[in-house]
Amino acid sequence: MKPSVGAGLAAICTLLGGAAVPALAHHSFAAEYDSSKAITIKGTIQKLEWVNPHAYFWVESKDESGKPTVFAFETLSPNALARQGWNRNSLKPGEAVVVEGYLAKDGKLLADGSIHANSKSVTRGDGRKVFVGSSADSEK
Amino acid sequence: MHQRYLGSVLGVAAVAALAALIPLNSSAQSEQKQGQNKGKFGPVGPEGQKGKSKGPAAPSGPTPRMPDGKTDFQGVWTPGGTFGNMGGLPSLQPWADALYKERRANLSKDDPEGHCLPAGVPRISPFPYKIVQTPTLLVILDEGNIHSYRQVALDRGHAPDPGPLWMGDSVGRWEGNDTLVVDTVGFNDKTWLNGQGVPHSEELHVIERFGRPDLGHLQIDITLEDPKAFTKPHSFQRIHTLMPNTDVLEYVCNEFNIDAEHLVGK
């Protein structure tokens, strides 16, 4: 398994001219994450924390040599996830996923050594998407 | 250490902008169409309910009334994607304009909401809120940004020198049976009026005229007065929709707010 797959998304810069939109999350997306650092990570779920203000899940991804790297993804808040029918069992430890998201701006590892990122969607092994949405959605 | 990963990352400056323009929970909806995850609390958008997503239609019916004939505002209400609406930018005094521009330049990294502090008034989150009403008190229970509440006293005037308060001192009086005029003063100057950082001073005075034109809609006509921060009063209207058969959920912002230490701005 490749450690990561570049997200080949077309930049549509003409869309950048819109009016400023208030942050949807409790924090400014742009102040914490870098929309120019879009990532797609293939790996396995280590754990999920159903916590506020954002649920988090950890994904272990291995490079060609088998060396693991762990990403900690911020997702939506538990209340927002619950209203879409998702819960703390929507991702199970050990299952294979592909996560699309963005890296944190500051590049600092979290206390547990994981790489800090923001998730915008998670694709499970059967192709179903869960935890769709990101604080990036609301920002210009 | 993760440069190796960054090497395979394609920078896409417009991704966030694009995402903002796409129907926001299209994937979730498609999943629901497959008969999965109907949603315990009804099909609303990812952050409670979002503007460009089609939430449930507001229920129709006549304006509910309290036993005394006054409008009954009770229910769970959602601002949907209009939560940030404040009718455009107020006309700001030079110092306030400079502060606003500084906050914009810093990408709102110091927004009190990002640090799990109260939103203030009349700023609201995208999450639903619940109104509980008695003849002498109206209570607004905010699901987010933090579990804050507002008490609107209907049986007294303002407390003398009530501030500085995060949510202010709110009192209400009825105009006929249809309109509740809520008057709030006594603020601190720490809250932002929106996520972009529109500032205010301790002289902020908020007048909210609450009406419920029918069962499914709450109409709030808002005027902000702040002679220290604005050059003139600023008025706008919000219309929120009723979310039947649901309730406000838990949202304990400080539980795991690791964001605070990673909000770096530029």
Image (cartoon, helix red, strand yellow):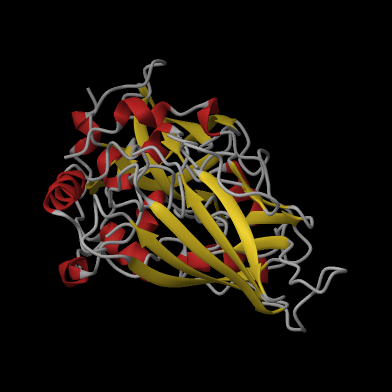
At 60% across and 31% down in the image, what residue appears?
Answer: A93
Q: Is residue B203 left or right of residue B158?
A: left
The quarter of the picture where the C terminus of chain A appears is bottom left
Q: Nearer the viewer, residue A72 or B60?
A: B60
At 44% across and 53% down in the image, what residue appears?
Answer: B123
User: Quarter of the image holding residue B84?
Assistant: bottom left
Q: Nearer the viewer, residue B262 or A114?
A: B262
At 61% across and 34% down in the image, what residue appears?
Answer: A50
Relative to B156, say whether B207 is above or below: below
Q: Is residue B25 visible?
A: no
Q: Residue furthest right?
A: B67
Q: Position of residue B254 (x, y in %)?
A: 51, 28
Q: Position of residue B62 (x, y in %)?
A: 77, 83
Q: Nearer the viewer, residue A106 or A47?
A: A106
Relative to B40, say whether A18 is above or below: below
Q: Position of residue B22 (x, y in %)?
A: 39, 70
Q: Is residue B216 visible?
A: yes
Q: Is residue B214 left or right of residue A111?
A: right
Q: Nearer the viewer, residue B146 or B153?
A: B153
